[in-house]
Amino acid sequence: MIDIRQMRYFVALAETLHFGRAAERLRMSQPPLSRQIASLEAELGVRLLERHSRQASLTFAGQRFLEDCRTTIAAFDQACENARMADRGELGELSIGFMMSSAYTVLPALARRFTAKHPRVALRLRELLPPDLEEAVKSGRFDAGIMFDVGGVGGLEARVIHREALCLAAPSDHPLALKVEIAPEDLGGVPLIIAPAETTPSLREAITGFCRRGGFEPTARLEAQLQQTIVSLVSEGLGVAVTPSSMRKLGVANVVYRDLVDAPQIEHVVAWRPANLNPALRLFLAEAGAG
């Protein structure tokens, strides 16, 4: 059976047309090289070379075989390299789920750095609601997810990769828009547009904790799952909201943002299943500072 080693021998000989120089290139003695070429010809059932006293020349079949050998060897070498790269996580596919807020904070720069360093890894990104994202990572639909702190979801490991302060989003004509900074007591009796606790529990807890510093529990006028939707409702004059500061980037008309006194922070984490064997995941976690 013909093997890749014999093809390499033949290419060296075909490029030098001299058994001695080919053997020297291959770092072997001439007799074994001659035997390998003879065995190759016998296996093929064709003459690849015309032997002369000092030189050799390719037959027509040899010329054709040389072209195909070069193609086959290149493909074989690439297959070997691909296997090594895949094992290192430098070739393959990586699926990352993310919540909307991370698209305005940590995700763009992280994705840009990762794809620049690992261009042969196909990075698949998809936006989901935080509760759906947790389940998608747990079930293996995604290799990892970027979300608000999940508070120790069973079956997932998580590392903090970003922190951001909360702020107040208010209609531009709202009385609170006139303040430079918002204290907890300023929100007393002010109904909020807020995300449900089951959607973003850590964000809801941070907002609740801020209000409790003013001696009251937050009152929800409207509940919406997406922060972008919440800001849109604020712009329509339906109320105010305590949101991550990254929502300032939305640029929604008729909304002003005000800092909070000793503003609570919300943590973004990358979460993944410890049993995930995708080698590219290790590289992504390292790039995110979570490896």
Image: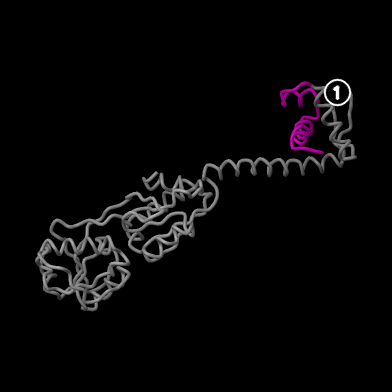
Write down the quadrant of residue 29 in the picture: top right
Q: Is residue 252 magenta?
A: no
Residue 226 picture location, percent across and down: 32, 69
Q: Amino acid type of disc 1?
A: Arg
Write down the quadrant of residue 39 in the picture: top right
Residue 58 picture location, percent across and down: 85, 36
Q: Nearer the viewer, residue 70 or 124?
A: 124
| Relative vertical location of residue 10 with respect to residue 176 in this rendering, above or below | above
| Relative vertical location of residue 53 with respect to residue 181 in this rendering, above or below | above
Say few, some or many: other residues with alpha carbon within 10 Å of mark 1 (under 14 / 14 to 19 / 20 or more).
few
Residue, disc 1: 54
| Relative vertical location of residue 211 with respect to residue 60 in this rendering, above or below | below
Give SS at disc 1: loop
Image-based side of 223 in relation to 49, left or right: left
Quarter of the picture containing the N terminus is: top right
Image-based side of 39 in relation to 117, left or right: right
Image-based side of 139 in relation to 183, left or right: right
Q: Which residue is at 36% across, 51% downward?
A: 158
Residue 286 picture location, percent across and down: 41, 44
Q: Is residue 20 magenta?
A: yes
Find the magenta span and give its range: 1-29
Q: Nearer the viewer, residue 95 or 275?
A: 275
Quarter of the picture containing the C terminus is: top left
Residue 259 picture location, percent across and down: 16, 61
Q: Nearer the viewer, residue 101 or 114?
A: 101
